Amino acid sequence: MTGRSEKEVRKKARDIEKARDDGHLQKPGQGWTVEQWLAHWVENIAAPTVRPSTLAGYRFAVYKHLTPAIGAHRLDRLEPEHLEKVYVRMLEAGRAPATAHQAHRTVRTALNVAVRRGHLRQNPAVLAKPPRLAEWEVDPLSLDEVRRLLDTAGRHRNRARWAVALALGLRQGEALGLQWTDVDLDASRMVIRRSLQRPKWVHGCGGSCGRRAGNCPQRRNVHAVAAETKTRAGRRVIGLPAPLVDLLRKHRVEQENERVTAGQLWRDGGWIFASETGETIHFRTDNKHWKDLLREAGVRDVRLHDARHTAATVLLLLGVPERVVMSLMGWSHSSMAARYQHLTAAIRADVAERVGGLLWATSETTTETTADHNADEDGR
């Protein structure tokens, strides 16, 4: 061990002893570069264990943003300031704060593994400050808007799809990934256990068609059609309101009629919400149907995900305990419920004011009401 002074050597010795005692002593031998570690982590550690959509995000962050910027650094010499410069450059290049935040979460996850394996003493990404993300505003639909949407949806096929979205607050992938084996209509319950996945197309022709993989005549989807929900909180049992049970019973009968009409064209996947030939509904198609429904019902243009916000708001307004709402919505963190508090508080205040106006009317209003009542009695 060397140093510019005896004091510096002693400090290095103490640091090594502390790292040994804490279990963070780096392994001897040739150190990793950041590029080498990130590539090893994403391809050999993350790839076999995470969902395809998560892996795609990791790879994009690693190969598009992190490796070109800091890949040449030695892993054990990476500093928080190196990472913060990456985030600033991303923003200056026009990248959204959310994209820079994704890069930050990716490198933090990768370096946490390096620390646990003794390749790194501490994780610089934990100390680095990522870009600030703007808080999104919850914008639920009003009760009148929900009723108009349900009334309009009643004139179309798959109308139960929108009742499930507005009443249960399922995520889009969860709703489209529902199968009939997931519901027990007699017991009025539904189990959420999987989510439909967006397809990942590759060429079936080897690229000879000259088109993008998604437009290849022989394209192949390399993603599974559906996957288990991402978190343990996402796997949950939901009770079904009686009107929704009746609607799902009717929907099942209508689907059986479509099966008969389709004949040999029917592709039975057991999906609750399916195309006219029994296949899964694509996310883009589902979004288009939602936008068409909004326009036909004369409801303002909102995202399909806002239907989920609507269901959560109704549950909180009804006074359902926060832990129960978290379970029903499949939230992993209580911070999600906190985003709704300002909204539900405002609505509750409005309701309280209306009730107060009804029960504690002014004396003049009370006198006039009594006089009108007496006049009516005299006239009968």
Image (spheres, rainbow, N blue to C red):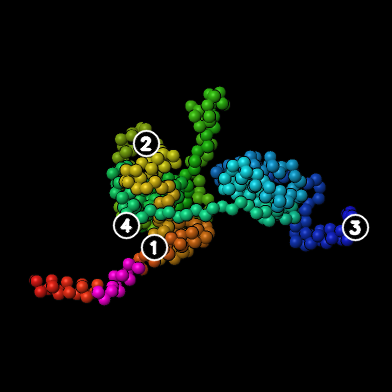
Task: Indicate the amino acid at tag 1.
Answer: Ile
Q: Please, what secondary structure does the residue beneath circle 1 have?
A: helix
Residue underneath mark 1: 347
Residue underneath mark 4: 242
Q: Are marks 3 and 4 in contact (CB under 8 Å)?
A: no
Quadrant where the C terminus sits is bottom left
Residue at point 89%, 55% (across, down): 4
Task: Indicate the amino acid at tag 2.
Answer: Thr
Q: Residue 5 got which mark? A: 3
- How far apart marks 1 and 4 lie (CA) works out to 27 Å
Give the percent coordinates (x, y) of residue 331: 49, 57
Does residue 15 appear to the left or right of 239 in the view shown?
right
Q: Most prominent secondary structure in the magenta stretch?
A: helix
Vertical relation: 216 (above or below) 73: above
Dot 4, how many residues are within 10 Å of its Cα: few (below 14), some (14-19), or many (20+)?
few
- How far apart marks 4 and 2 lie (CA) works out to 28 Å
Question: Which numbered disc, 2 or 3, marks the residue closer to the eye?
Answer: 3
Does residue 79 appear to the left or right of 367 in the view shown?
right
Q: Give the mark nearer the N terminus: 3 vs 1.
A: 3
Task: Indicate the amino acid at tag 4.
Answer: Ala
Q: Would you identify the image quadrant in which residue 3 lies?
A: bottom right
- How far apart marks 2 and 1 lie (CA) works out to 44 Å
Q: Please, what secondary structure does the residue beneath circle 3 have?
A: loop
Residue underneath mark 2: 277
Residue at point 20%, 72% (across, down): 369
Question: Which numbered disc, 2 or 1, marks the residue closer to the eye?
Answer: 1
Q: Give the mark nearer the N terminus: 2 vs 3.
A: 3
Q: Are marks 2 and 1 in contact (CB under 8 Å)?
A: no
Vertical relation: 120 (above or below) 347: above
Q: Please, what secondary structure does the residue beneath circle 4 have?
A: helix
Q: Which residues are magenta?
A: 353-364
